[in-house]
């Protein structure tokens, strides 16, 4: 039984049946389902995801006019936050976020730092904040795999693939008639979107081993500083169960969501993505200005689709124009260029298969002197090398 939980899935009879089932399960002392869709809370403007309410676990409120800027908070159970942003859609933010999360997991394992000094495998998460166009389920091979479970106090439990904990609006949409939710739109106005953003930021339980039996820990409701201290000392939530880094895939632009994130959350670094085209660079510059304004440190810039390397000759072509304007801008602003990712078919096809390119050290390319249908050859995965180099710099900057 699936219960509606957002404005796009409201259906009063279904909700009544689900509430009744939930009530019966409780009174019969059967374990009540802890799936997201069977949450007994009604979605509202204040609670668009319809998570069970817990007054002690309230996200910070957006400031009303005249009340000043809110205090930035840490995301519960997350040590470092890295936002991947750009002014424009289609420049590769989601692709970069997914590959960067995987590359961070590989890089961080080889380079112990103050974030994760112990020799354990680093814990990396990926949060998709693109409410209207979530891509993380597809890119991480988590499409139609079911919905998140809830902890005892109503925290969303991330879904995991390739060793990365993921959360996305795409996991929370009801399936359409085809059985898939790929066609289900989110039809919300600004306030609902901001509230849903806050819930995705503060109501996900990123702890290792979070399960429907996980009780609320003192750490989740305290101030960031006390939360960190509590988690480090509480045997139920040792610091090594926290995420080392949460990569956030931002929606395009400098609107409500980007602003909510920047004002509410202590972001440790922003990676601003552009392509060589001037239309993309103009918008990326706006992103940089916004982060400066809200005092989010910029880890650096990434030029995506910067060039194409011919499989035959190894020659690089700047298909989308010269990188000069991008380089000049970075130099003027004193911003580091973290990397230049080539336009490479495997980046795109791998994303569509839910197998990001970072997972493959080598790729198959067609060569054969430019003839269509030439022989396949194995080559180094240049995009992967670049992602690993970017991840290494980010990891060092975050430490
Ligand atoms: N370096 C690249 N090489 C080839 N295709 C890419 C590359 N970067 C992104 N793409 C493709 O471009 C499209 C847009 O990327 P996406 O990550 O969805 O952008 P955004 O999140 O900024 O809207 C996708 O089809 C993706 O596979
Ligand atoms: Mg995207």
Image (spheres, rainbow, N blue to C red):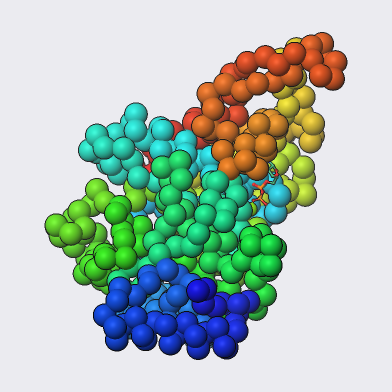
Horizontal and vertical percent position of residue 11: 60, 84
Residue 269 picture location, percent across and down: 46, 50
The answer to whether 129 appears left or right of 116 in the picture is right
- Examine the image and state in which quarter residue 22 appears: bottom left
- In the image, farthest residue toward the front: 28
Along the viewing direction, whichever of 198 and 188 lies nearer the viewer:
188
Total marks shown come to 0
167 or 233: nearer the viewer: 167
In the figure, 100 relative to 75: above or below?
Answer: above
As drawn, is 121 to the left or to the right of 226?
right
Task: Identify which residue is drawn at 54% across, 27% down.
Answer: 360
Up-down relation of residue 287 to residue 191 (above or below): above
Residue under the point 35% across and 45% down = 123
Residue 146 in picture, x, y percent from top left: 50, 59
Query: Where does the C terminus fall, quadrant-wise?
Result: top left
In the image, what residue occupies the spot 64% across and 62% down? 179
Residue 371 in sight from this viewpoint? yes
Q: Is residue 79 visible?
A: no
Q: In the image, is residue 116 above or below residue 69?
A: above
Percent of width and height locating residue 63: 47, 80
Quadrant where ligand 1 appears: top right
């Amino acid at each position: 039984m699936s219960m509606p939980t957002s404005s796009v899935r409201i259906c009063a009879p279904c909700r009544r049946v689900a509430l009744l089932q939930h009530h019966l399960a409780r009174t019969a002392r059967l374990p009540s389902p802890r799936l997201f869709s069977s949450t007994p809370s009604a979605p509202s403007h204040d609670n668009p995801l319809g998570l069970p309410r817990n007054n002690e676990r309230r996200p910070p409120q957006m400031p009303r006019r005249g009340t000043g800027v809110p205090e930035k908070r840490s995301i519960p159970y997350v040590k470092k936050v890295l936002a991947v942003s750009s002014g424009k859609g289609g420049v590769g933010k989601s692709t970069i976020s997914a590959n960067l999360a995987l590359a961070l997991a590989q890089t961080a394992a080889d380079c112990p730092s103050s974030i994760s000094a112990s020799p354990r495998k680093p814990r990396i998460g990926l949060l998709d904040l693109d409410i209207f166009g979530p891509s993380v389920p597809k890119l991480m091979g988590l499409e139609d795999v079911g919905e998140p479970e809830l902890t005892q106090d109503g925290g969303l439990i991330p879904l995991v693939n390739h060793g990365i904990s993921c959360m996305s609006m795409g996991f929370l949409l009801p399936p359409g008639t085809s059985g898939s939710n790929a066609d289900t739109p989110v039809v919300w106005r600004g306030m609902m979107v901001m509230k849903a953003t806050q819930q995705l930021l503060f109501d996900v339980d990123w702890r290792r081993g979070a399960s429907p039996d996980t009780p609320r820990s003192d750490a989740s409701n305290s101030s960031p500083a006390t939360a960190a201290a509590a988690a480090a000392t509480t045997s139920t939530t040792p610091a090594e169960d926290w995420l080392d880094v949460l990569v956030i895939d931002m929606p395009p632009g400098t609107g409500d969501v980007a602003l909510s994130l920047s004002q509410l959350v202590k972001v440790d670094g922003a990676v601003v993505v552009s392509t060589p085209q001037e239309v993309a660079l103009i918008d990326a510059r706006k992103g940089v200005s916004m982060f400066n304004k809200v005092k989010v440190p910029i880890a650096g810039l990434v030029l995506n689709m910067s060039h194409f390397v011919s499989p035959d000759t190894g020659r690089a072509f700047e298909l989308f124009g010269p990188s000069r304007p991008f380089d000049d801008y970075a130099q003027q602003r004193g911003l580091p260029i973290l990397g230049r990712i080539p336009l490479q078919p495997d980046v795109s096809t791998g994303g569509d298969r839910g197998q990001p390119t970072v997972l493959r050290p080598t790729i198959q390319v067609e060569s054969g002197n430019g003839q269509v249908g030439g022989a396949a050859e194995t080559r180094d995965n240049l995009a992967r090398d670049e992602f690993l180099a970017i991840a290494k710099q980010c990891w060092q900057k975050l430490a």
